[in-house]
Amino acid sequence: TPMYFFLLKLALLDLGAISTTVPKSMANSLRDTRDISYAGCAAQVFLLFFFLGAEYFLLTTMSYDRYVAICRPLHYETLLGSRVCLHMAAAVWACGFLTALLHTANTFSLPLCQGNAVDQFFCEIPQILKLSCSTSYIKEVLLLVFSACLFFGCFMFIVVSYVQIFRAVLRIPSQQGRHKAFVTCLPHLAVVSLFFSTGSIAHLKPSSISSPCLDLVLSILYSVVPSALNPLIYGLRNQELKVAVSNLIPGCFQKQ
């Protein structure tokens, strides 16, 4: 079904996002070093923007999938057929790739005039811009603002979709059915809100309010926490996935 088709893509993107930053940070901690090559830094920026950008576009697509499933169930097969799902997935990957390519190419074309020490546990665009000349990073800032506006449009689409979903859920006569729908939807909306708010603040906040501790917390909240929480929200709360995992790992879950 489309839901599990998109869940597979979400799992791959979460795995990619976590693998981009955390293993390198752990390896540096074990070796007591903070070194990363220039090419490795560029690859880290590209991959992180690709995986997180594609994930955000995918979450937008998944909110539409939930809207059609709950609000227009009789048209579900027509609106979300296999070909439509493939086209939507291809658009998600393409948008993520294009966004990452633009930001990476623009950021690493800037001359670095303030040294080469990035004050973060991974290569992050705002930290790289601090090393650039004061007059050379305006284009990248404008590109970040444009990306933030694009992500805000996706966020508003998700909110509107869930408003329609909640209106449909409130008409469900069964209290158990309403509770199940809210328990599934609200954590997803909370993670999306956390992802959007912390990512926007981290990339758009003025340098006057920047501090190493604040930058670290914001970076963890948008680059690590959503990818860690998504498997819990979409996996452990899904009874069919729990049954499938329990068949693979006996004793892992108790069947209800």
Image (cartoon, rainbow, N blue to C red):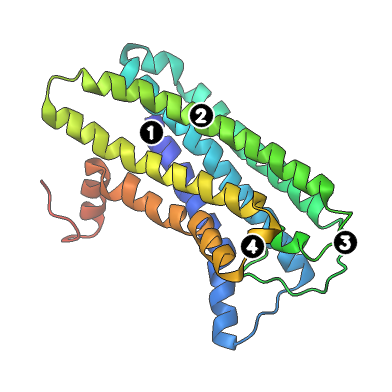
Q: CA distance from mark 3 to mark 2?
A: 35 Å
Observer-nearest of 135 and 183: 135
Q: CA distance from mark 4 to mark 1?
A: 40 Å
Observer-nearest of 160 and 80: 160
Q: Which residue is mark 2?
A: 156
| Mark 1 residue type | Met
Q: Which residue is mark 3?
A: 133
- The image shows residue 12, relative to residue 113, as above or below, that is above
Q: Which residue is mark 4?
A: 210
Q: Secondary structure at mark 1?
A: helix
Lower position in the chain sequence, tag 3 or tag 2: 3
Local packing at callout 3 (Cα closer than 10 Å; few below 14, some 14-19, many 20+) is few
Q: Quadrant of residue 145?
A: top right
| Mark 2 residue type | Met
- The image shows residue 116, relative to residue 155, as above or below, that is below
Lower position in the chain sequence, tag 4 or tag 1: 1
